Image (cartoon, grey):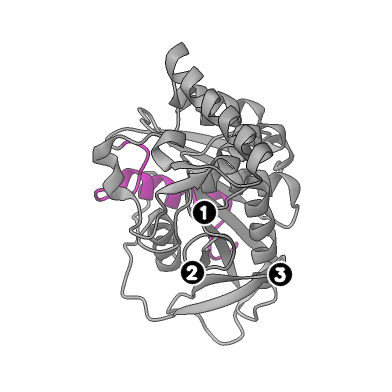
């Protein structure tokens, strides 16, 4: 494709467990530094965001971080508050909290001696992609954004995930019951993650073993209210890549199409076939090729 060859991941020996602060909590991460890094060199870097109540480990986030490291980038994959090995109430995930965690991760990473603070990008998958786009829209320090199977309008996304009047009523009734339960008891109502984001059984194998299976209704309401659509246009003139599977059975493909319509330039949109929602599943070669080519043009590991 376009005369380039993809570098496959090699053996990695420079992955370090780290912690950093975010709003009074300690978040857990893994910092990837390419083997080729030389003393005194300042590397371009990516913050790598995991999906819905997921984990930095055994996930698309880990696959993305390994790829980026093999291509010459530093990468920080980390668990959002309440997820994985990070502090915070288990499963209590709110979209704007994750934006804050991402911005705090950027502040921490920019202070590292191995990192070029002016060349820190954000990449996310699914829920993490929505957070990546929103963060890029509200924080000018973000140098570039890659969104993988993300979304821009929580209410419209949920309508696609719970199609038809009966399913939509069941979902919105759940939100209403959660609000009433909180008002009457002061306690959170927990529901299955599948009641919030349905995923066909065959695709569930792509989730991390550390992913959580229950979620508070407050999390679903936070997603319902979240609109990366409103800020995606503010990413320009920094580059944005929107990657989505063409027949996505989890996050409706139209979500990335609508983001593209609202984005400024330079923004590129790619649809791939052969996988649903998890573009790096299998050998992941189409997604790898597209990401590598986009990076070479818009955010090269070696400028110039």
Which residue lies under the disc numbered 2?
A: 85
Q: Is residue 303 magenta?
A: yes
Q: Which residue has dot 3 on it?
A: 24
Residue 91 is tagged as: 1
Q: Say left or right for 39 vs 52.
A: right
Range of residues picked out in magenta: 276-304
Q: Residue furthest front?
A: 185
Mark 3 nearby-residue class (10 Å; few <14, some 14–19, many ≥20): few
- At x 66%, y 53%, the residue is 97
239 in the magenta segment:
no
Q: Work out whether mark 1 precedes mark 3 in sequence or the reverse, and give the earlier one.
A: 3
The quarter of the rendered structure image containing the N terminus is: top left
Q: CA distance from mark 1 to mark 3?
A: 17 Å
Q: Left or right of 64: which side holds 93?
A: right
Residue 62 vs residue 177: left or right? left
Question: For numbered disc 3, what is the local secondary structure?
Answer: loop
Q: Residue 108's spot in the image, x, y percent? A: 67, 72
Indicate the position of residue 17 as horizontal and vertical percent values. Answer: 48, 78
In this rendering, the label closer to the viewer, 1 or 2: 1
Tell me where residue 133 appears, x and y as whole percent. 62, 44
Q: Earlier in the sequence, mark 1 or mark 2?
A: 2
Q: Nearer the viewer, residue 287 or 100?
A: 100
């Amino acid at each position: 494709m376009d005369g380039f060859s993809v570098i496959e991941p090699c053996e990695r020996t420079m992955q370090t467990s780290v912690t950093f602060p975010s709003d009074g909590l300690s978040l857990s991460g893994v910092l990837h530094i390419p083997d080729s890094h030389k003393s005194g060199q300042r590397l371009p870097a990516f913050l790598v965001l995991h999906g819905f109540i997921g984990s930095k480990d055994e996930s698309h986030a880990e696959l993305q971080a390994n790829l980026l490291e093999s291509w010459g980038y530093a990468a920080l994959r980390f668990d959002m508050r309440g997820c994985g090995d990070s502090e915070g109430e288990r499963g209590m995930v709110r979209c704007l909290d994750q934006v804050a965690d991402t911005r705090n991760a950027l502040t921490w990473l920019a202070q590292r001696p191995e990192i070029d603070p002016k060349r820190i990008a954000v990449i996310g998958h699914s829920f993490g992609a929505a957070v990546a786009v929103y963060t890029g829209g509200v924080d000018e320090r973000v140098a570039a954004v890659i969104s993988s199977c993300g979304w821009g309008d929580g209410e419209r996304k949920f309508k696609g995930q719970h199609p038809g009047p009966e399913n939509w009523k069941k979902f919105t009734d759940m939100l209403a019951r959660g609000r009433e339960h909180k008002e009457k008891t002061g306690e959170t109502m927990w529901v299955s993650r599948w009641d919030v984001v349905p995923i066909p059984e065959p695709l569930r194998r792509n989730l991390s073993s550390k992913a959580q299976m229950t979620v508070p209704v407050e999390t679903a309401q936070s997603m319902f209210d979240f609109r990366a659509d409103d800020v995606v246009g503010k990413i320009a003139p920094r580059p944005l890549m929107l990657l989505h599977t063409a027949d996505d059975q989890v996050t409706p493909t139209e979500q990335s199409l609508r983001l593209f319509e609202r984005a400024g330039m330079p923004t590129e949109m790619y649809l791939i076939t052969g996988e649903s929602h998890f573009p790096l599943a299998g050998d992941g070669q189409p997604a790898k090729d597209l990401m590598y080519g986009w990076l070479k043009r818009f955010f090269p590991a070696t400028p110039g």
